[in-house]
Amino acid sequence: MSGPASFVEVAVPIPVERTFTYALGDLQLPEPGTRVLVPFRRGERIGWVLGPASGEGIDGIRPVLDVLDDEPSAPPELLRLCRWIAGYYLAPLGITLRSALPSVLSDASRDYVSLADSTSAVGDGAELTPREARLLELLAGRDGPQRVRTLRKALDSGSIWPEIRNLEGRGVLRHETVPPRDAGVLTRKVVRLVRWLSSLTEREESFGRAYRQKEAYELLEAAGGSLELAHLTGRAGFSRSVIRGLEEKEIARVEDEEVIRDPFAGRDPGEAPKHRPTPAQQEALEEILAGLEQEKPVPFLLHGVTGSGKTLVYIELLREVVLRRGMGAIVLVPEISLTPQTVSRFRAHFGDEVAVLHSGLSDGERYDAWRQLRNGEKRIAVGARSAIFAPLPRLGAVVVDEEHDGSYKQSETPRYHARDVAVVRATRSGAVCVLGSATPALESWANATKRKFTLLSLPDRVAGGALPTVGVVDLRSVRRNLEGGRGAASQRTAARADDGSPPAGGTVLSPALVDAVRTRMASSEQVILLLNRRGYSSFVQCRECGDVRTCRNCSVSLTFHRTRGRLVCHHCGHEEPAPDRCPRCGSDDLSFRGLGTEQVERIVAETFPGRRIARMDVDTTSGKWSHHEILGRVERGEVDILLGTQMIAKGLDFPRVTLVGVINADVGLHLPDFRASERTFQLLSQVAGRAGRGVLGGEVLIQTSVPEHYAVRAAVAHDYAAFAERELKERRVPAYPPHVRLVNVVVSSPDPELAAQGAEGAVRWLHGRKEVGLGEGVELVGPAPSPIERLHGRWRWHFLLRSPSSRALGTAARAVASGYRPRGGDVRLVVDRDPTALL
Ligand code: ADP
Ligand code: ZN
Ligand code: ZN
């Protein structure tokens, strides 16, 4: 058979691991990556064309309804990358494409139709079908563009696309796909419109007694002939009818101007500091630049201690790639709101070349940025995880800053790791890839050891600055001293800070830490205090019966939030009022235990009266710009003590911070997860790295009950290599990454029995298939209840697949992901490849 293709294969974003075949009808075969509208079940979906299909042996193939792109919205390189992600992470291709592209491109509900400008009826005299007539009637009866979805509901049946396309073809209807509007205005293009009022002529006599019109006109003239409409009707206080009056007299005209929205635009990125690279920076840079000359450069691991000037290396690299060679570059940062300084540095150097992709963008803004990258208006994408999908036509470099950061792993389908995707994308496009960190992930370290990555080191802080000295406060002896001094009641006082004021911190702030803070305050320096646990108390326990309040959806204790007077689940968000009495036995002797940032804030305020304290955690940073606001105050010296969770450990560079105190290093150290020690080491090293970045030098005090733990000791000594060596040993038996690869399979259900049966069934199923290769290189561990047994109302069981061979592991994981169907009611199976946590 030859001739034009009559069927296409389409990836539809639904959680099913297959693609679908549609008939093309009269349509030309679109290029792969082009979006099409297709009928799906009883509705319509947007999918992506993958290529021609045979259609043989398939009954009832339905037609493609519409081709939505002029050029593929997923360019070939991105389509290939998504295919790799879908295959490796065992995710449906349609869902992968959807998450790689701006959301406005995959939402069929954003199709609108409106009556065409001519209010006259159908001009060509052709008959209307009853459905078409009804559709026009509906539109005539409503104001402005209507959602296709709403109209379909009103017509209460099937697709209305044939009618829409027919009427559109006859010029009666207009159809458009638009992102949701911030202001609710619909426009053909995805840009914000700013309305301007511009003067047309000088005809003062025509104002008569319309004094307000005259005033508005004069204001307009004084402003040089045009003004933003919002200014006139807002600040200046002219009514709409005044403006309309000017328009009717043809004295002025309202015009729309397209403005690409950029929330960073109004923010001054500051001056670009002109540093000359140090010899160490220069050496690293030259190696990377040499990589640019190679066809398939090996990725680089840039291991530089905190304050070693990694950012300057990235900037110099981009200067070459973007400014000299005219190619594109992607810079990934962990969470953009937490790293405003890093982002500002890129903006200061590259100005308008930079598109900042952050979570605060509206869908429309994100789409604007995407288009600008796609058409070459901007050549640098800076953003969190998903920026790895930036549609840069000629990619020259990919930088992953703080490559060890846990936020690079996506916790929903597709469960990709952006660092690993970065390596794959860069390698395939022949781009240079630089992974930077002071505390590289052990996987990356192992890759460097095996020469899969080229290791580059910046062993010292820039300009001869020293790493801060790190001291340890043993909380066990602090507690003993306190008990010795004040009797047994003191233990209680420290834990229940709300029943009186603890003396100068109690066991929360040790005497050594209090002294150190006082000294810094006396010389007007700044202090950072870290406690990686938010809320006031992490659990509430009845002293009578021992009952701990747990979440009704999850098997975790509820955290007391004092300002709101509520108990909150940090996993699912469930909230309830804080009890006065034990719900189980009625006793009013409740103890609020487990220290959180909210409580520390109070104790710090009591211990250091008059000091300006800022707290930064999830609870204080819900607003779009609240991170910037808090960090801005610290930068301007308006804050003496910055207190917070791991948020404050990332990338901040404040030269007046001379002391970092860790309230309790042990939070997280004893979690039942193989990365607990690594996470603790990284957190301690990173937060310590915030101290002494200026000429004033600095020190760090770590409070801990386990000063002998190797993660604490290595952080104290700034000795990454020692930590890595020990941790690699710890992960030999039982074997964990990087010695082996892991897949975590979680089976969950609202019914505990079904969850257990589902997991057991999956394991039996795997054992029963020879081709899966269990026992021959792939080991299965479990099943067992997950460490967090219940989450979001679902009971969870899991088992692990592990293997030194990625390929063998992939085969086994693919088998269970696409072959095994748990029985019973609501049972879900999640396959997480290269998991970052097993909780
Ligand atoms: P890192 O990311 O490695 O922790 P940064 O890139 O934030 O370190 O750099 C630390 C500080 O040193 C910044 O304030 C930066 O402006 C400054 N810096 C970097 N390189 C140089 C240089 N070559 N000369 C002088 N100062 C530098
Ligand atoms: Zn009780
Ligand atoms: Zn919960």
Image (spheres, rainbow, N blue to C red):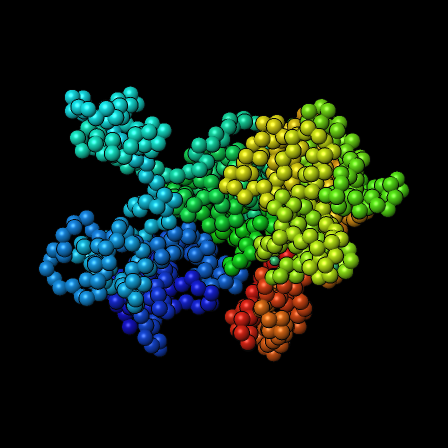
Please name whichever residue, 95 or 27, is drawn nearer the observer in this view of the structure: 95
- Whether residue 812 is visible, yes or no, is no
Say which quarter of the image contains residue 673.
bottom right
Q: Is residue 487 left or right of residue 241?
A: right
In the rendered image, residue 796, in percent from the top left (x then y), is placed at 62, 66
Q: In terms of depth relative to the viewer, which is nearer, 193 or 415?
A: 193
Residue at the spot 67% in from the left edge and 53% down from the top edge: 579
Depth check, front residue: 612 or 567: 567
User: Can you give x and y, in whole percent of width and height, for residue 590 in the image?
Assistant: 74, 53
Residue at 68% across / 35% down in the picture?
A: 528
Q: Position of residue 510 (x, y in %)?
A: 79, 38
The residue at the far right in this view is 484
Residue 19 in the image: state x and y as whole percent: 41, 67
Q: Dividing the image into 4 quarters, which one contains the C terminus? A: bottom right
Q: Residue at x 60, y 73 (%)?
A: 754
Residue 583 against residue 661 in the figure, above or below: below
Q: Quadrant of ligand 3?
A: bottom right
**535 shown above or below 265:** below
Residue 694 figure quarter? top right
Instruction: Identify the residue at image location x=30%, y=68%.
Output: 157
